[in-house]
Image (cartoon, rainbow, N blue to C red):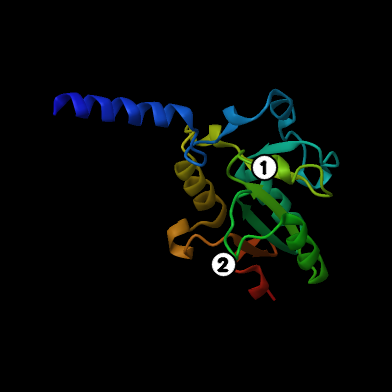
Amino acid sequence: MKHYFTLATLAFCLLLSACSISGIFTDYNQLTQEEKEKVVKCTEDISKINDFNKLYVVNVAQIKQFITEKQNVVVYSYVPFCTSKNCISPKTLIDDMKAKGYSTLIVSDTYADAFISVGSNFPLLMIDNTVYKTKLRGKYTELFHKDLLGVPLKSINYASYHLFQNGKYVKSYQNYKEIE
C-alpha cells in the first residue's frame, strides 16, 4: 500500500511540474524576453503616454492623478484571459465609453496574456505589485483596489468597471453597459 502511495505522489508531482498554473502570481516570469523588455515602469503622467507598444507598470497615485484631470473616467480591471460574458475587449470598452463622454483606463492585474492588447490605440497599464511587497495576485489586487476605490473588492462583488466623476469614486459595475 505504501508503494502505491509513493507512486501516486510521484505521478502527481510530475504532473504539476509539467504544467504551469496561471493567475496565482504576477505571471511576469512566463513572459518571453521580448515581452519583458516592453514592460516599463511609468515615469510620466498617464495622459502623456503615446507609445502603445509597451505595458506600463503604475501605482494608485498615478491613476488617481489621471482621474482628477478628467471629469468622467471608467477604470477597467482587465483580466486578459477572462471569458466571462462581462469581460470585454479593452477596445470595445474604450469606444463605447468615449461615445458616452468617458475617458477610460485599462489596468491589468496579471501579465498572463496581457500582450494580446498591447499595441492598440491605448496604453495598457499593470498594477505595480512591488508597492504591496507581494507577488500573490489576489493579495496585491485586493490592496490596489482598496487604495483606489476606498472599499474592499468583496463589497462590490468583484466588479471590473469602476466609475469616477470629478475625481471621486462613484460606483462599480459588473456589466459596463449599465454605465450611463
Secondary structure beneath label 2: loop
- Give amino acid for label 2: Gln
Between the residue at mark 2 and the residue at mark 1, the CA separation in whole angstroms equals 21 Å
Q: For residue 48, which quarter of the picture? A: top right
Which residue is located at x 84 percent, y 38 percent? Answer: 51
Q: Which marked residue is nearer to the observer: mark 2 or mark 1?
A: 1
Lateral position of residue 65 relative to residue 30, left or right = right
Q: Is residue 99 above or below residue 106?
A: below
Residue denoted by label 1:
114
Q: Nearer the viewer, residue 79 or 166?
A: 79
Disc sitting over residue 175 in the figure? none
Q: Residues within 10 Å of mark 1 (few under 14, many from 20)?
A: many
Q: Position of residue 180 (x, y in %)?
A: 70, 76
For marks 2 and 1, the one nearer the N-term is 1
Q: For residue 152, which quarter of the picture? A: bottom left
Residue denoted by label 2:
174
Disc tally is 2
Lateral position of residue 20 relative to residue 169, left or right = left
